[in-house]
Amino acid sequence: MEFTLMFLVSGLLIGGAFGFVLQRGRFCINSAFREVLFQDYTMLRAYFLAVVVTMVGANLIEAAGLLQPAADGTAGQLYRQAFVPWANIAGGFIFGMGIVLAGGCGSGILYRVGEGNLAYVVAVFGFFFGIVITKFGFLKPVYDLLISTPVFIGPNSDIVPTLDNLIGVNKWIVIAVLSAVMLFFVYQGKPTLKAKKGYSWTMVGILAGLIAVAAFWASDYFGGRARGLSFTGPVREFFLAVLWGNSQAASTDKTMTLLGMTFSWSALYVLAVPIGAFISGKLLNEVKLKVPPANELITVLLGGFVMGVGAQIGGGCNIGHSLTGVSTLAVSSWVANAFIILGNWVMVYFKLIRPMRDLDV
Amino acid sequence: MAIKDEAAAQTLDTLGRVCPYPLLLTKKALEKLASGQVLKVLTDAPASAEDSIPRYCEKSGFTMESVKLEDKGMWELYIKKS
């Protein structure tokens, strides 16, 4: 009984804290990638900072033996996603395009629901639609084809490729080099914890990273797998639980049944993200119920759908891959992330840069 | 005289618009103004009002004053093109 209560509380706390921090720090990975094209690297620095914190923190807790041992007694490990080249590439690119149309990334659309823009509610529904149509619906044949060729390494072809085992160096060397490069870039932006209002980019990068590390531990302890923060699977699991009574979580994942609905641990924190953002926004008097013009609403719906398709194919979104996955050094996430950025840039060019040239404001 | 008390050359209404339109439309409107003119922007997107637009103005050397309508969850931003 006690364990079940903490299952619920830990999920809500982590999701709520994440939503609160995202809102207060205006953290959006879609913006981070997009603004590079406009020579503004502030959000990118926040993102890099979050990655460094998550990468170091998560690998430290793994090395310190803080994760639950596997069924066969071996030391608990972070969940590193299998490398499925075509899926990671296509899915990442499609997702990158979708977030531009939707006006936010996987975490961005969730937290902005808490600020009251109903367009983001539409985006979240579109996201769910895209995910489910790809995993279970009419796009399933395409999905099944794209995920049918995973690439493993090692003498028995059963090891998930990571940056370190691919190159053949100690993981901590890779982590040290990546952290040094990213922190150098972060430092150039003159990090500061002070902000006139809300959280500075430095603060939000650090806090988001810390919450991501906590999520690795909590998802492992309560959920049965060190999945960390992610939104694609969890959004799917949340809606499946509410609509059909069962998250249909992976067989390795623990669940909890509440009011007749069986939830995975991650599904519960999805619910808490907009709530945490709402609390932060309300305290700052920034919450207002609003809608965009009608044609923008359609674009957002389409964007959410495209995001969902891309995220399901690619195996993750800007949090699942770009923050969590990248921190585990899984090759799948580094490849997917590169293509998320490319997809973002391509869509920014066609949807935002080119049309704006002729626009009469 | 505070910028917000000067007559605005243009009022740009971005209420309800999703990211990144408040910033993008603001940039576009400012392009068309002459130096010294004031653009008034209405926005209810916290990330734009508190983060991206102020940062853009600072980078471009434009002065910005922000009037937050606390009970309405929206902002009036007054930007003077330098």
Image (cartoon, rainbow, N blue to C red):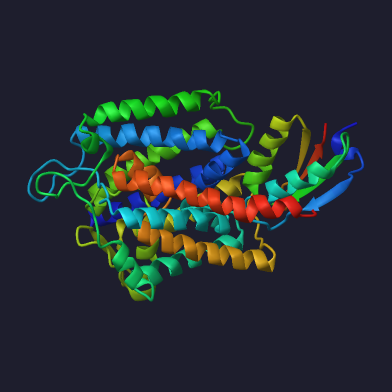
User: Residue at the spot x=26%, y=32% of the render?
Assistant: A60
Q: Image point 25% across, 59% down: which residue?
A: A149
Quadrant of residue A266 within the rendered picture = bottom left
Q: Whole-percent x and y of residue A360?
A: 80, 54
Q: Residue furthest left?
A: A72
Q: Is residue A217 left or right of residue A282?
A: left
Front position in the image: A69 or A86: A86
The residue at the point 55 percent across, 26 percent down is A189
A52 or A238, nearer to the observer: A52
Q: Position of residue A350 (x, y in %)?
A: 61, 55
For the residue pair A128 and A147, the one nearer the viewer reads as A147
Q: Is residue B22 above or below residue A36?
A: below
Q: Residue at x 52, y 50 (%)?
A: A344
Residue A231 seen in the current view: no
- Residue A185 appears at what percent x and percent y? 48, 27
Q: State whether residue A131 is above or below residue B56.
A: below
In the visual, does A288 lie left or right of A86? right
| Number of marks in picture | 0
Residue A230, position as x, y percentages in the image: 37, 51
**Residue A145 seen in the figure:** yes
Q: Image quadrant for the N terminus of chain A?
A: bottom left
Position of A316 with respect to A294 (left or right) is left
Front-most of residues A34 and B5: A34
